[in-house]
Image (spheres, rainbow, N blue to C red):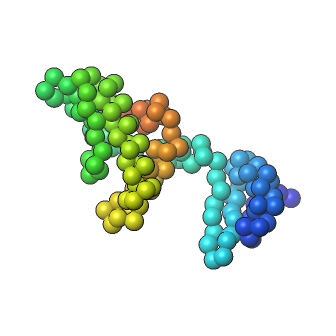
Amino acid sequence: MTTRHFPTFTAARSHLRDLLDTAHSGRVTTVDRDRERFAVVDAEVLRTHLASLRPSGAVVVAEGGGWSAFLPGLPIAGEADDLDGAIDDLIDALREYAADWNDRLLDAPNHQDNWALVTLTELSTDEQLKGWLLRDEMSGAG
């Protein structure tokens, strides 16, 4: 029988390989520490689910001979002479926002709810973020 729930940090540390193998297999895996419970999940599984559960809502517009791309309601935008450049600039802005969020914004009332966006950003490659951003825009959802 596979251990999936580790009642203490010490138990998890002693069986780290088992903990990671169990999480990798897709089974619900937890570690308890003091009065808190932590879930251990495969990063790509988490990234894929966050991308499907949190549409980007990206808006891409041609204006003034260039392109702008932004996420409404967030201080995240990009612009360039062409569409690809604007998306690349938006991805850079997402990465900067994720770093700022982890450094100082996570407890700010108007940024607290952006955990999923930051986690998705940090777990994604630039190409994965580009697909996530454009999927909504190209389907007419953005």
With respect to residue 91, does 72 lie above or below? below
Residue depicted at x 13% and y 27%: 64
| Quarter placement of the N terminus | bottom right
9 on left or right of 105: right
44 on left or right of 80: right
Residue 13 is drawn in which quadrant?
bottom right
Residue extending farthest to the right is: 1
Residue 52 at least partly seen: no
Q: How many numbered discs, if any? A: 0
| Quarter placement of the C terminus | top left
Q: Position of residue 89 (x, y in %)?
A: 33, 33
Residue 98 at least partly seen: yes
Q: Position of residue 127 (x, y in %)?
A: 47, 30
Residue extending farthest to the front is: 103
Residue 69 is drawn in which quadrant?
top left
Residue depicted at x 67% and y 71%: 33
Q: Position of residue 28 (x, y in %)?
A: 68, 58
Residue depicted at x 63% and y 77%: 35
With respect to residue 71, does 15 lie above or below? below
128 on left or right of 5: left
132 and 68: which is toward the camera: 68
Residue depicted at x 46% and y 44%: 121
With respect to residue 124, does 6 lie above or below? below
